[in-house]
Image (tube, rainbow, N blue to C red):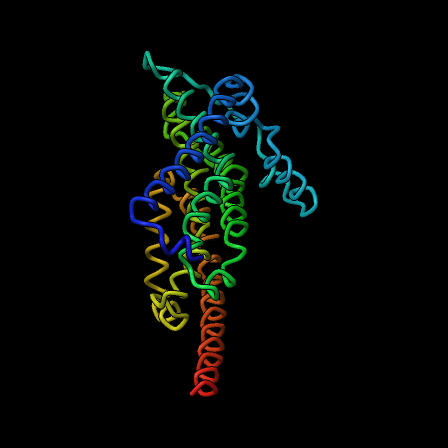
Amino acid sequence: MSEEKEMSFLDHLEELRWHIVRSIAAIMIFMLLSFFFTPWIFHNIIFAPTRIDFPTFKWLCKLGDLTGATDALCAKPFPFKIQSRNMTGQFTMQILSAFVIGFIISFPYVFWEIWRFIKPGLRQTEKKNSSGAVFAVSFLFLLGISFGYFILCPMMTWFFSTYSISDVIINEFDITSYVSTFIALVFGSGLLFQMPVVVYFMTRVGLLTPKFMRTYRRHAIIIILIIGAIVTPPDPLSQVLISLPLFLLYEISIFISAYVMRQKGKEEEREAKTDEMTA
């Protein structure tokens, strides 16, 4: 601890630089691997939600069989054609998708590197209360990624593939449009699912209280709808699908904020008793 306190500003910058270098190196390694396996990744991961044999469509069919709503829940085969209208379209999307996949795979390690830099500056009680930060952030990020991939993406592809205002119009999508939307849904969901963690730390530093969150719940709903409109394509289905779990996360965050407030109250009581004993 004494060595950490004696570190100069430039020493901290040097340490931060190496954390960033290691994080970028991890991302680049997985990015290069993703770039090498691009054909397999595009066929089995990125284009998988466009096929009727995707797990989500199978689960909906099974649910339809169990509930007697097969016609309503079991999706019929739908045409989905991809074109590349720009000369650099395929190459650009290959690089972009490889980078995003590399970042997603290396995210737990990247956050661990960031946490290693932040943790020494915390007090002992703060370190104790945030001991599971890396696991919580990584878990919520991967949970959000899974939600975006298994729920939003197949619903989005089905909706836009089957939507038509005239029989004259044929739905054929550009590779740039599809991949960009795919990344926005998946990656955006991973970031939005960090809400409980953000609320936890904001409550710890005194910027949020459960009373404040309950009082402004209606305002939060409007903000959630706006966020859903920003990170999803401009269609009601995607916005509703991303907004519903955010509502649930908001309610969970209220309980988390209340828990943090109780813990802070207990800590203050212990500190007051300690001060009385030492006085």
Q: Residue furthest right?
A: 66
**Residue that appears at 39% across and 25% down:** 96
Q: Nearer the viewer, residue 108 or 234?
A: 108
In the picture, which quadrant includes the C terminus?
A: bottom left
Q: Residue furthest left?
A: 9
Vertical side of 162 occupied by 144: above or below: below
**Residue 37: where, in percent of width, then height?**
53, 18
Q: Is residue 240 visible?
A: no
Q: Nearer the viewer, residue 65 or 273?
A: 273
**Residue 206: where, in percent of width, then height?**
35, 68
Q: Count all numbered tags in the image, as a single digit.
A: 0
**Residue 53: where, in percent of width, then height?**
62, 28
59 relative to 268 in the view: left or right:
right
**Residue that appears at 38% across and 62% down:** 202
In the picture, which quadrant includes the N terminus?
A: bottom left
Vertical side of 99 occupied by 239: above or below: below
